[in-house]
Amino acid sequence: MRFYWNGTSPFVRKVSVVLIELGLWDAVERVQTNPRDQASGFWDRNPLAKVPAFELDDGQVLFDSPVICAWLDETHGGGRLSGTGERRWRIQTLSALADGAIEGGLLARQETMRPEGEQSPAWIDKQLAIAQRGLDRLDASVAELAGEPNLAAIGAACGIAWLGFRHSRIDWLQGRPRLAEWYAGFAERPSMTGTLPG
């Protein structure tokens, strides 16, 4: 199995954390990838030109992170990160919420990378507000993140870390004491300390 990745993507980090939590980190070949480099041949594996992507032994390529994480958990984790029954749908919903908060932060960051005269402050504010609302809902749902790791908890933790890394002028956990307390504990897991962005 091959894991196409780079070191700063929060979605790559989600997959990395899942691999470590399932004891698979050393079982995959990790391929450092610049998804913007057409000459690398990566676009043939993922035409969306995004990491992460995950190549199975039969050559099939999975993307993006929700699919990869679910596949890893089902095939190698017995579904323990996904939950069962109604809980499974809550975990998927909270995972999508965490991903949406990350996307808001990503879109805001991309806008700030445009030439200053072409940036839209209103667009940046809108996307950061989406991320803030996502964290508000995660704060209200923190009981569902607690306990044994699940895919929602992994996504939320990776999202909080990335937002703090890329939008460091904002205190993302201010006014969210339950989420802050939960995150402080989860961030100490070896799967998190071993996958710090940089």
Image (cartoon, rainbow, N blue to C red):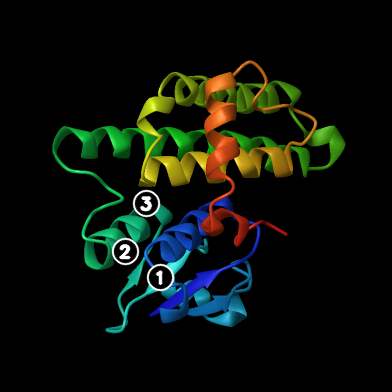
Type of amino acid under label 2: Leu
The reply to whether residue 120 is visible in this rendering is yes
Give the image location of residue 79, x and y in percent. Answer: 23, 55
Q: Secondary structure at mark 2?
A: helix
Marks 1/2: CA–CA distance: 10 Å
> Could you say which quadrant of the image residue 131 lies in?
top right
Say whether disc 3 or disc 2 marks the residue closer to the N-terminus: 3
The circle drawn on residue 54 is: 1
Q: Residue at x 47, y 36 (%)?
A: 98
User: Would you say 66 lies left or right of 180 here?
Assistant: left
Cβ–Cβ below 8 Å for labels 1 and 2?
yes
The CA distance from mark 1 to mark 3 is 11 Å
Q: Quadrant of the N terminus?
A: bottom left
Q: Quadrant of the C terminus?
A: bottom right
Disc 2 designates what residue?
Answer: 72
Mark 1 neighbour density, 10 Å: few (under 14) some (14–19) many (20 or more): many
* Amino acid type at image mark 3: Pro
Residue placed most toward the observer, 119 or 62? 62
Q: How far is the residue under mark 3 from the one under mark 2? A: 10 Å
Q: Is residue 195 above or below residue 186?
A: below
Residue 135 vs 76, above or below: the answer is: above
The image quadrant that residue 83 belongs to is top left
The percent position of residue 188, horizontal first and vertical second, equals: 59, 48
